[in-house]
Image: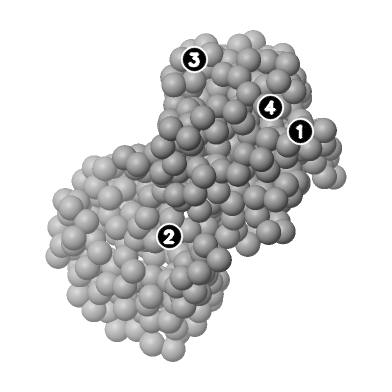
Amino acid sequence: MPNSYINAPEGFTAAGDHIGLKKQKKDLTLILSEVPAAAAGCFTQNAVKAAPVLYDMPIIASGKKVRGIVINSGNANACTGEQGLRDVRAAAGAFAGLAGCAADEILVCSTGVIGVNLPMDVLLPGIGLVFDKLGGDEQSGEDAVQGIMTTDTFEKTAYEEITLGGARVKLAGMAKGSGMIHPDMATLLAFITTDAAISPEMLQKALTASIADTYNMISVDRDTSTNDTVLALANGMAGNSPIGAEDGDYSIFLAALSRINRKLAIDIARDGEGAGKLMEVNVRGARTEADARILARSVTASNLFKAALFGADANWGRVLCAMGYSGACFNAERVDVAFRSAAGAVAVSKDSTPVAFEEAAAKAILSEKEIFVDIALHDGDYSATAWGCDLTYDYVKINGDYRS
């Protein structure tokens, strides 16, 4: 099977290893492009931003090309003041020195515990250790995705191949995320590499458009992190005619990028801390797209409904409750709700009133691992989909001793 990890596109290498930031698991990942790459990024909306976010944002805004990314797990380098920024610059400089480029051609991301300084005596030599392992093979790619994981229980990767002007183009993505997940964005780090030739402006436009219906439509626990970052690098080594406008090739590229981000976003929701079930909420017939998005997101974020989902309890009133406090405009007397899964489907509400259903059948439907909540509003022509998970005892256990 051909390599489909983050180092699959032409000209990219990657590696990950354990350097000592965490007790045992891999905790440092490097991604390097053979040639300067167009770069795009989207970042947390939290007013408290980690040092790597503050460092990366102006580099992305400048439109300059980038050679690589340093990603550490186990320490968020957030709420660390000027020392945190100095540490980011030192990490970028260490990688740049090895790669033979300028420090501001290296982006930096961190994930882990907030409010603790990075142990630079561990990180800086670790960058050299992992640099020596950079490769374009499948094992190097797998090591890279393992190096960014924190409480994740499985690897989150995605891969696409498309044709742009007769040239074969590859896109690959990887992400981490399990807790502190809520729209705008969630607690996540996501990275996309591609050998497509595309201008920084068009790459940024595509990335911004694609996260609106992917990462910004997932919720695990209503918490938005200090470190959320999605970065995309495009090095042009596929040899396609450069994309510089919203033409047909741009549309093909955007569709592929959106598929990458959709898969990664759903995997993050599926892997919510302690989660046993993935929830997909589909809102149809809204007055506006904004209303549809707000309503879908409110249902996925409702702790009461998430708890009902955990217990396989068809408590549909919690769906309407979450919609009612969402702030969206809708006719509260004309809402239809149905639940479905691999075990079947059941209508539970028509025009916001009860529909007779068999409790045992509903419980069987809600006992599956993937649950779909279908909401019809009869207000207009707009729709939206959001993803979330159930709320379990394990969520409290995981977050009760996160630092230990």
Q: Quadrant of the N terminus?
A: top right
Q: CA distance from mark 1 to mark 2?
A: 36 Å
Q: CA distance from mark 4 to mark 3?
A: 20 Å
Which residue: 59% across, 37% down? 191
Residue toward you, 372 or 75 = 75
Mark closest to the chain's N terminus, 1 or 2: 1
Residue 102 visible in the snapshot: yes
Say if 385 sits above or below 105 in the image: below
Mark closest to the chain's N terminus, 4 or 2: 4
Looking at the rendered structure, the kind of residue marked 1 is Gly
Q: CA distance from mark 2 to mark 3?
A: 33 Å
Looking at the rendered structure, the kind of residue marked 4 is Phe
Label 4 sits on residue: 95
| Rendered image: mark on residue 220 | 2
Residue 256 visible in the snapshot: no
Q: CA distance from mark 3 to mark 1?
A: 28 Å
Which residue: 67% across, 22% down? 96
Q: Residues within 10 Å of mark 3 (few under 14, many from 20)?
A: some
| Rendered image: mark on residue 128 | 1
Q: Quadrant of the C terminus?
A: bottom right
Dividing the picture into quadrants, the one containing residue 238 is top right
| Left or right for 249, reference 124 | left
Residue toward you, 200 or 28 = 28
The answer to the question of whether label 1 and label 2 lie on touching residues, with beta carbons closer than 8 A, is: no
